[in-house]
């Protein structure tokens, strides 16, 4: 059987690219094809006029590691969606025996995060990069949301959870979520680091209390 080979330039670092290749070869991950991935990107960008700034809404790792050129960052509030650990990970920050969890946007409520601006001249290159990262598989559904900022409301691209995806965890109770985050660890490091950096990013934009902070406190307790 042919081994999976991907271009490491598309996936953060050579180390992460190797993790992805190994996960594919082990049957733990199915990559979205380049054609299918780019088709979703082109459909979403159809409404963007030449010379326009494109905004991306970050609510997890995009807040602290966007990995694409960001022209401006604003604290933002999106209504109609809330952040939740609802996606199993058995590669980067977990294993098949002890899976970790990653964030997704679920319908309902609201979510505080960051609106990240892509300058007009960078739209093609930056959106291609963020799509290769967030749309690695079919875990997310990209869509436009309204991001409210102190400087006004902007349309922003958000990667919402795909509930039909096989790694969708559903609505686990908070104790189960905290336990998986506290104990899971994979080649990319402990799952709790993902939550620590998310909370630090929320603190940075002035959101210093909330469910993510409570979850981190409980995960530290369970970690002992």
Image (tube, grey):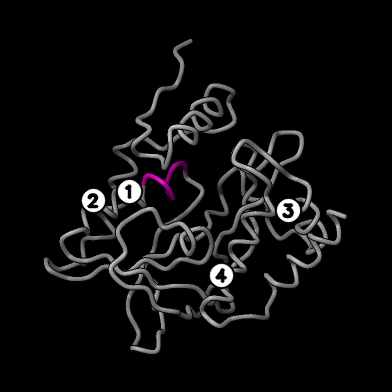
Which residue is identified by label 1?
A: 129
- Secondary structure at badge 1 equals helix
Q: How many marks?
A: 4
> How far from the left and from the top, in percent, is residue 111?
54, 76
Residue in front for this viewpoint, 114 or 139: 114
Q: Can you say whether 14 is above or below 155 in the image?
A: above
Residue in view at x 56 percent, y 59 percent: 104
Q: Nearer the viewer, residue 57 or 167?
A: 57
Spatial separation of the CA atoms under disc 4 and disc 2: 29 Å
Q: Earlier in the sequence, mark 3 or mark 1?
A: 1
Q: Earlier in the sequence, mark 4 or mark 2?
A: 4
Whether label 2 touches label 3, CB < 8 Å? no
Quadrant of the drawing holding the C terminus: bottom right
Neighbours of disc 4 within 10 Å: few (<14), some (14-19), many (20+): few
Is 124 situated above or below 54?
Answer: above
Q: Per the image, is 136 magenta?
A: yes
Q: Earlier in the sequence, mark 2 or mark 3?
A: 2
Task: Tell me the residue at 49%/36% (across/down).
Answer: 16
In this rendered view, identify the residue nearer to me: 214 or 39: 214
Secondary structure found at label 4:
strand
Q: Which residue is mark 4?
A: 107
User: Sequence-wise, which precedes: disc 4 or disc 3?
Assistant: 4
Residues shaded magenta: 132-137
Q: CA distance from mark 1 to mark 4?
A: 26 Å
| Quarter where residue 99 is shown | top right
State the residue at coordinates (38%, 53%).
67
Is the C-beta separation of discs 3 and 1 under 8 Å? no
Residue, disc 2: 125
Q: CA distance from mark 3 to mark 1?
A: 27 Å
Q: Are marks 1 and 2 in contact (CB under 8 Å)?
A: yes
């Amino acid at each position: 059987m042919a081994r999976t080979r991907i271009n490491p330039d598309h996936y953060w670092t050579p180390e992460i690219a190797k993790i992805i290749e190994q996960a594919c070869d082990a049957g733990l991950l199915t990559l979205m094809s380049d054609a299918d991935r780019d088709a979703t990107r082109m459909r979403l960008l159809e409404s963007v006029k030449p010379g326009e700034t494109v905004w991306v809404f970050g609510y997890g790792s995009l807040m602290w590691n966007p990995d694409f050129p960001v022209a401006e960052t604003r604290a933002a509030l999106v209504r109609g969606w809330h952040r939740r650990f609802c996606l199993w990970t058995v590669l980067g920050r977990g294993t098949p025996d002890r899976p970790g969890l990653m964030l997704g946007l679920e319908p309902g409520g609201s979510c505080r995060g960051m609106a990240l601006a892509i300058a007009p001249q960078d739209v093609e290159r930056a959106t291609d990069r963020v799509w290769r990262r967030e749309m690695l598989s079919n875990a997310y559904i990209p869509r436009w949301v309204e991001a409210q900022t102190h400087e006004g409301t902007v349309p922003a691209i958000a990667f919402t959870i795909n509930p039909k995806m096989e790694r969708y965890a559903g609505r686990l109770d908070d104790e189960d979520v905290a336990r998986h985050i506290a104990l899971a660890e994979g080649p990319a490091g402990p799952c709790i680091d993902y939550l620590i950096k998310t909370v630090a990013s929320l603190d940075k934009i002035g959101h210093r209390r909330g469910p993510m902070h409570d979850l981190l406190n409980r995960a530290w307790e369970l970690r002992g």
